[in-house]
Amino acid sequence: MSFQNQSSVLHKFKGILFSTMSSEELLNSLDFFSAREDDVFLVSYPKSGTHWIAEVIGNIPNARMSLTSPIELGDISNFDELKMNSKRRVIPTHLSYNMLPVNIKQKQCKIIYIIRNPKDTAVSLFHYYRDNPNLPGIETWAAFFELFLRGDVVYGSWFDHVLSWEEHKNDKNILIIFYEEMKKDPSKSIKKITTFLGINVNDSEINKIAQKTSFSEMKNNAAKENCDPNHTICALTSNRNLVFRKGAVGDWINYFTSKQRRVFDELFTEKMKHSELARHFEDDS
Ligand SMILES: Nc1ncnc2c1ncn2[C@@H]1O[C@H](COP(=O)(O)OS(=O)(=O)O)[C@@H](OP(=O)(O)O)[C@H]1O
């Protein structure tokens, strides 16, 4: 397989690959994390639009919420830092439902789960692997495609991740947002988010948030911020510039061969046959 150093920059925990930015000690201690009832968790498989939702929340007027680092990033001192945050916390994570600290489930904290078409997600993650020194160098799209299909990538299989959320999709403390829907009508998704958070925001403010969080705005701002490590919510790198690549729906068509498309579609149909969440992607996937 044409990739280098997979084991020097990644490690497996409970059968799932993590970057070395998530220490084994921290991952082992997740169930000791103490959640607060008003915490909001921003959850996604990597490259599904986490930064976008975080920016939306950050732009809600008078929200008085504070975006933290991902729960699984760093070492055990991460929990102390989170504890010291006195505001209402917005905590990002790429963990599947099964790996989420038990305390978050017991307290029924609000959770926003963003999902993106798996083909676009794969292409985005491929570029991220290629450009990110914290991830192994994968030489070709063909090699990465095989890893993605097998779930041999950071945070494991896209299919397993989405399926772990399937049976919780109607829980009243969980809001599911689809990347493609948000792209089509950002104001509508933003309204769903503010309503879910219990914050009253009028339509004109919603439209302003949509403008401020457009892909081009966020990309320009990231360039200006010049990689401030305190401004990242990515569990895989501190380089925010790497996050804003194309921000498009359907870019996968430029990468998948017709054979890869067929192989992917067969696997998708087999794995996701009982998934209502996946129906959203049937036309495309
Ligand atoms: N505002 C806005 N509009 C549309 N798309 C956006 C936006 N912000 C981020 N993105 C795109 O989301 C992809 C990154 O996802 P994440 O933020 O989840 O990345 S990370 O896993 O936390 O690193 C990545 O997708 P690709 O461009 O396809 O690589 C980003 O460009």
Image (cartoon, grey):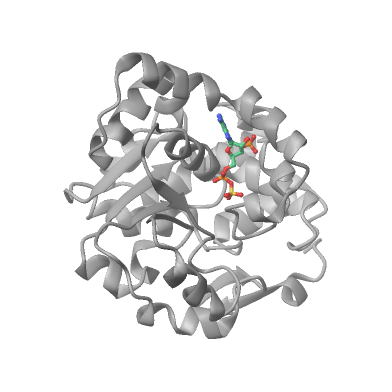
Q: Is residue 203 left or right of residue 2?
A: left
Q: Height in image: 146 above or below 31?
A: above
Compare residues 141 and 5 and report the one nearer the observer. 5
- Choose top left, top right, bottom left or bottom right for residue 109: bottom left
Quadrant containing ligand 1: top right
Q: Residue furthest top?
A: 204
Seen from the viewer's position, the closer of residues 169 and 227 is: 227
**Image x and y of residue 85, in percent:** 44, 64
Residue 90 higher or lower than 214, as above or below: below
What quarter of the picture does the N terminus occupy? Answer: bottom right
Q: Residue at x 25, y 39 (%)?
A: 196
Whether residue 116 is visible: no
Q: Is residue 216 above or below residue 257?
A: above
| Residue nearest the observer in this picture, 91 or 2 | 91
Residue at (38% x, 50% y) in the render = 270
Residue 39: % across, % down? 32, 58
- Whether residue 254 is visible here, answered yes or no, is yes
Residue 63, how many percent across, how many down? 36, 40
Q: Residue at x 80, y 63 (%)?
A: 3
Residue nearest the viewer, comparing 156 with 44: 44
